[in-house]
Structure formats: structure tokens, C-alpha cells
């Protein structure tokens, strides 16, 4: 980026391949960076940090970690839905970050820190998913898996190359033929809404709890209680099946612990 190619390799450095024609594709006007203070900051991050492997970063060979996080985020805040003016967007992003950094157990940890029971089934399920994730990760590290990925990548690349020979390039930045570029109408600017007119939807936090006749999937709910800010709600529901002893024990324990707590 600073025009110093002493440590570059021909396999990925455009400057070493063709120095006269080379321009940085992702820097303003394709020119080298010049700021020394930025350079020393960057060196501190990439060279002074043992967890960062500059060799891997240099060729930008894998954006897998980013894609992985992007998928988590897309599941909680899909782009097709408009969440940017809703206060829930913050929670959605926060939970994606927690899932990425802490694993699936984050749900029960959040519950515990809010003073709620962390939920046995939630813990069981999250540890199951975590185990699965760990196994997949270990499997991906084996020589066989790496060889398979390499083979698949090669097949993909050669397929694309052979298609490009036949059809020409179909996917690249700024790819429009002259005829097409004349037909594309200009997209109008977005009308800006003044700050005082913007209404941010407030999402209140609702804490709720269920009591059930048992621990199976087909159990009935016997009590539903919720509270939000200063509003309390509690209702009992007549079950259609007998209450199991374990469930009634749990409910009783729960009641007594609430009484102790209050
Ligand atoms: Zn270079």
C-alpha cells in the first residue's frame, strides 16, 4: 500500500506482475499511501500482534471469518427487513457478536446475568451445538478436508475461466457495456428526513416466565407471567393433562426462590 513491494510475491502482487500498469484498486486514484502515522499504527496492529498472521492477510486468501459472521448477522437482522429505525437492531447485532465470540451458550449466560433461570434445555441445546461446531472446525483442519477444499476451488476457477472464454466476463466491478450504460437512468438522491422528525421505535424489554405441566414438548403451559418496566402480567391456565411431580417441584422451588429474592 505504501509502494514498498520488497516482501511481495509474484503470485498475488499486481505491481510485481506489471509495474507500469499497476494501480491500487482499493485506494483513492490508485495512488500509494503516504501518511507515516497511519503506517506506524498499521504496523502496530499487524506486526506487533501475535494473533494476526500477516502472511495470511497479505494475499487476502480467506474472508471465511467475515462471511461466517455475516451469516450470523443476516439470520438475526435480515437485509430484506427494515430494522435500522428500530431499537431492536442493537440487540440483534449484540447477540450476533455474542454468538460469534462466546458460542451458543450466550443465551443462558444473558439469562443468568438478568437474574432469570438459565434454562436447562437451552444449556443442553447450546452445548450440543457448540460440540458440533467444534467437531466441524477440527474436521476442517485435517489434511483431507484441506485437499478437498483446494480441489473444489480449482474446479470452480477452471469452470469460471472456461465460461469466461465462451461468454466473456459477466461479474466484475464497473462491468457495463457502452450500450447498457446509456440506458441506465440515474438513481435519485435519498430525501433526508430532519432529525427531529425521525421517530425511533422504542422496543421495551419484556421479561417473561412460563410454568408447565412437565418437561416434554407436549406439556401444557399452566402459568404465564411477564413484566416490563412498571407493568406486571400474570395469568393461570387450566391444563388439559395432569401435572408431573418434577414440574410441580420446579414450580414450587421457583416460587420459594422468588419469595426469598423479593
Ligand atoms: Zn506488492
Image: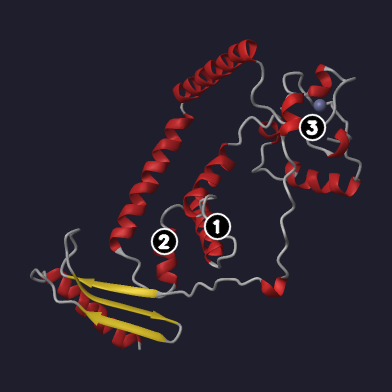
Left-right relation of 148 to 258: right
Closer to the camera: disc 2 or disc 3?
A: 3
Residue that numbered label 1 is attached to: 82
Q: How dense is the environment of label 3, judged by Cα within 10 Å: few (below 14), some, or many (20 and up)?
A: few
The label on residue 69 is none
Residue denoted by label 2: 107
Cβ atoms under marks 2 and 1 closer than 8 Å: no
Residue 2 as seen in the image, left or right of residue 8: right
SS category of the residue bearing label 2: helix
Please name which of the two marks, 3 or 1, marks the residue nearer to the observer: 1
Residue 82 vertical placement versus 231 (above, below): above
Between residues 102 and 169, which one lies in front from this camera angle? 169
Q: What residue is shown at x 89% (from left), y 35% (from top)? A: 31
- Residue 39 lies in quadrant: top right
Q: Is residue 9 left or right of residue 223?
A: right
Does the CB distance between marks 3 and 1 fall below 8 Å?
A: no
In this rendered view, identify the residue nearer to me: 185 or 243.
Answer: 185
**In terms of image quadrants, where is residue 8?**
top right
Amino acid at each position: 500500500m505504501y509502494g514498498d513491494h520488497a516482501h511481495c510475491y509474484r503470485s498475488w502482487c499486481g505491481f510485481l506482475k506489471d509495474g507500469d500498469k499497476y494501480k491500487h484498486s482499493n485506494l483513492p486514484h490508485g495512488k500509494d499511501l503516504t501518511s507515516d502515522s497511519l503506517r506506524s499504527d498499521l504496523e502496530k496492529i499487524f506486526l506487533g500482534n501475535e494473533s494476526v498472521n500477516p502472511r495470511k492477510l497479505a494475499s487476502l486468501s480467506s474472508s471465511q471469518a467475515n462471511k461466517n459472521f455475516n451469516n450470523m448477522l443476516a439470520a438475526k437482522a435480515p437485509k430484506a427487513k427494515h430494522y435500522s429505525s428500530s431499537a431492536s437492531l442493537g440487540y440483534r447485532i449484540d447477540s450476533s457478536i455474542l454468538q460469534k465470540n462466546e458460542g451458543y451458550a450466550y443465551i443462558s449466560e444473558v439469562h443468568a446475568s438478568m437474574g432469570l433461570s438459565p434454562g436447562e434445555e437451552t444449556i443442553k441445546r447450546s452445548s450440543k451445538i457448540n460440540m458440533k461446531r467444534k467437531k466441524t472446525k477440527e474436521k476442517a483442519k485435517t489434511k483431507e478436508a484441506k485437499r478437498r477444499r483446494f480441489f473444489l476451488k480449482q474446479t470452480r476457477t477452471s469452470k469460471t475461466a472456461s465460461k469466461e472464454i465462451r461468454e466473456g466476463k459477466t461479474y466484475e466491478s464497473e462491468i457495463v457495456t457502452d450500450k447498457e450504460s446509456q440506458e441506465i437512468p440515474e438513481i435519485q438522491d435519498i430525501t433526508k428526513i430532519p432529525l427531529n422528525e425521525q421517530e425511533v421505535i422504542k422496543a421495551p424489554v419484556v421479561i417473561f416466565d412460563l410454568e408447565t405441566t412437565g418437561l416434554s414438548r407436549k406439556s401444557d403451559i399452566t402459568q404465564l407471567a411477564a413484566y416490563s418496566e412498571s407493568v406486571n402480567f400474570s395469568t393461570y391456565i387450566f391444563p388439559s393433562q395432569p401435572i408431573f411431580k418434577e414440574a410441580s417441584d420446579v414450580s414450587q422451588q421457583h416460587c420459594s426462590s422468588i419469595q426469598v429474592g423479593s
